[in-house]
Image (cartoon, rainbow, N blue to C red):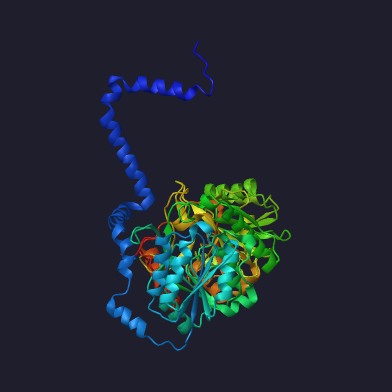
Amino acid sequence: MSKEHTPAELPAHRDKRFDRVRDTWYWKASKPLRVIVHFFLRMKNAYIHYGGLRGMYRRWRQKRGEAVKRVDFGTKSFPDEARRRLEEETVFPRDLKISILVPLYNTPEKFLREMIDSVRAQTYKNWELCLADGSDDRHMEVENICSGYQRDDKRIRYEKIEQNLGISGNTNVCFSMATGDYIGLFDHDDVMHPSLLYECMKVICEKDADYVYTDEATFTSPDLNDLIVLHFKPDYSPDNLRANNYICHFSIFDEKLLEKTGLFRPEYDGSQDHDMILRLTEAAKNVQHIPKILYYWRSHPNSVAADINAKTYAIDAAKRAVHDHMRDHYGIEVEVESTRAFPTIFQVKYPIEGAPLISIVIPNKDHVSDLRRCIDSICTKSTWQNYEIVVVENNSREQSIRDYYEELEKNPKIRVVTYAEEFNYSKINNYGVTFTKGDYLLFLNNDTEVITPDWMEQMLMYAQREDVGAVGAKLYYADGTIQHAGVVIGLGAHRSAGHTHYRMPKEHLGYMGRLCYAQDMTAVTAACLLVKRRVYEEAGGLDETFTISLNDVDFCLKIRRLGYLNIFTPFAELYHYESKTRGLEEGEKLRRYEQECARFREKWKAELEAGDPYYNPNFSLDYSDFTLRF
């Protein structure tokens, strides 16, 4: 009889058994085989992860050139003598003074001097630097250093605060010192790109912007070229901002906005910037983004850039900031929870109003096993019960599907209707809609399978908002890699549209955590798309000239043209066994696909030339994993 082991003894017991195996001759003799097997397993995983041999080669090139590319965004990007002269001599149509606000607190001398020197090095000269010093008595050198700078440059204003008022209170003292037309917020240990204020002035004057923000990088102190994070941001995205303070640095705004928003609020210390940016961007008439790294966030021990856990109070403050903003500005009581990506990247849960009927439209031809799996998963897993399913039968030939339809008709929630013409994805779905009763339409492919039970709730909470058009889900292939996590226009070989994070593992956090929060996207796939009936009708339904592909992207662009937002949420998850019914594009189907791509590019030429607003132009359009342009 074998000895029983307690849970505490099991690990040691297993280790001893494994040691005995490793000492055997056959374990040692099989080592070459194990090495080969493990190598091929790694290659298989890499092949899936990076999308084939081309993706693996591209990833190798990316890693090889990564260090060089990062340096390119450091001091190498600073203006040379000729460029500096050109920027310094530029006369803008508006003569604006920019007030840079910096609350100081026990700032190390090196950080303080580098911060001030980076402001003085600006090519745009009409600025003032407002320094409010809350340092304690053991750091009198802060006052001495600032006083010395103030004597040399009258644009530097300094005030010693007798009692430290905290981050918000100290910054509010800076506000009281400011006399500028626009205000920029700057941390006491960070560094500006020399062209930062010049680039902001260009956008303010050219686009009449009252709020401007830039891309940023995090560097390891003291080397400004040791860039550990390059944060290339989307254009203004309110849902992204609620989920995390992606705007952060550098922000500059018209001082008149303060009349609507007020100053910093001490109850949000630690996340006072997030609170302020939420209020300012809501009040602004024209928020503009400069897709250039113009701000350098220093990472050092005890900085938030190094470890958010150094300031755990910031997490709670950020949650309160988002919750209170939605309550005060919109009258909505949301729940705000940290996600697996990062403590200050949030899932924002909206309350669902009432119990509206969701009409699910599923086109189908044969493929009884796929359709059965799809509908069974809806019926057995979904926690939302007020739905109906309309299956649109399109020229099936197999008796098995006819038998299954008869079975489905016994369910009062399900109806099968027949579309007898040749395959046209747009026409089939538009036809199916005419048989629905719900205020919400959910377009769903027959080769999908529900994973998250509250998938409909997760989509509905966004679709019910007045400012939202289409909502899309996170879809996976059978192997667990990502099939859909939002659509970017212009992405891919045909420069029409492509899926982001394509073929990445299910557990991947995404670029800057983007696979972990709901966000604004230009388009989402109709393989699983929820939209209000009213918005669907306002957009004119799916364009029936797009018979095979791009009809969903076209639909989403029509929705955006009407002024609505489209949203991707990673919290509604399904498997998508990718176009099994339609099959691969080849022969005539491939020719039609290419023709539709050409028509799409012509129809949406202006939007494609402008670029996807939620996809930074520093990213390559050849790859879906946010690879930088070479």
Give the side of residue 572 with respect to residue 43, left or right. Answer: right
Question: At x 38% / y 50%, what residue is drawn?
Answer: 49
The residue lying furthest to the right in this view is 354
Give the x, y percent position of residue 98. Answer: 49, 78
Q: Is residue 606 above or below residue 484?
A: below
Q: Quadrant of residue 345?
A: bottom right
Give the side of residue 240 with respect to residue 456, left or right. Answer: left
The residue lying furthest to the top in this view is 1
Give the x, y percent position of residue 192. Answer: 41, 69
Give the x, y percent position of residue 200. Answer: 45, 77
Q: Nearer the viewer, residue 215 or 521?
A: 215
Q: Quadrant of residue 414?
A: bottom right
Q: Nearer the viewer, residue 344 or 192?
A: 192
Q: Quadrant of residue 110?
A: bottom left
Give the side of residue 353 with respect to residue 36, left or right. Answer: right
Q: Nearer the viewer, residue 225 or 529?
A: 225
**Quadrant in which the C terminus is drawn:** bottom left
Give the x, y percent position of residue 542. Answer: 54, 70
Give the side of residue 517 with respect to residue 24, left or right. Answer: right
**Residue 599 showing in the rendered view:** no
Q: Is residue 267 above or below residue 577?
A: below
